[in-house]
Image (cartoon, helix red, strand yellow):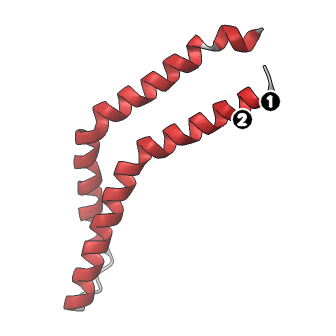
Amino acid sequence: MTEQYIMDLGRQAMTTTIIVGAPLIGIGLLVGLVISIFQATTQINEQTLTFAPKIAAVAVSLVFFGPWMLRTLADFTTKLLESLPTVIR
């Protein structure tokens, strides 16, 4: 096992993490932005107004993107476990 292999494995792990997390973070950010614009235009400054729609949007997007996220993580884990004999040498 070389230092280059470890760095490449870390890069792949970080890339997979970003790719898997991006849809949920993006949708939460988009819903938060829409609600912030709504609050600014109506001058409603209720703190709890932002949480419920964000949670609902992330839950719906998790149902929608969940199978893809699970498949992506399973593929990464499978590749990692298949490379285990190479790492041991």
Q: Quadrant of residue 82?
A: top right
Q: Is residue 33 left or right of residue 22?
A: left
Q: Position of residue 18 (x, y in %)?
A: 49, 46
Which residue is pictured at 43% across the width and 23% down the height? Answer: 74
Q: Residue furthest front?
A: 4
Q: Position of residue 5 (x, y in %)?
A: 72, 26
In the rendered view of the protein, which quadrant contains the C terminus? Answer: top right
Q: Is residue 85 left or right of residue 76?
A: right
Label 1: element kind: helix
Residues at marks 1 and 2 touching, judged by CB atoms closer than 8 Å: yes
49 over 1 or under it: above or below: below
Which residue is pictured at 39% across the width and 55% down the height? Answer: 25
Check residue 60 in the rendering and tell me which mark sits there, or answer none. none
Pointer 1: what residue?
3
Which residue is pictured at 28% across the width and 40% down the height? Answer: 65
Q: Amino acid at mark 2?
A: Met
21 over 5 or under it: above or below: below
Q: Quadrant of residue 57?
A: bottom left
Other residues around mark 1 within 10 Å, as few (<14) / some (14–19) / many (≥20): few
Which residue is pictured at 36% across the width and 35% down the height? Answer: 69
- Front one among 86 and 74: 86
- Front one among 66 and 19: 19
Label 2: element kind: helix
Check residue 7 in the rendering and tell me which mark sits there, or answer none. 2
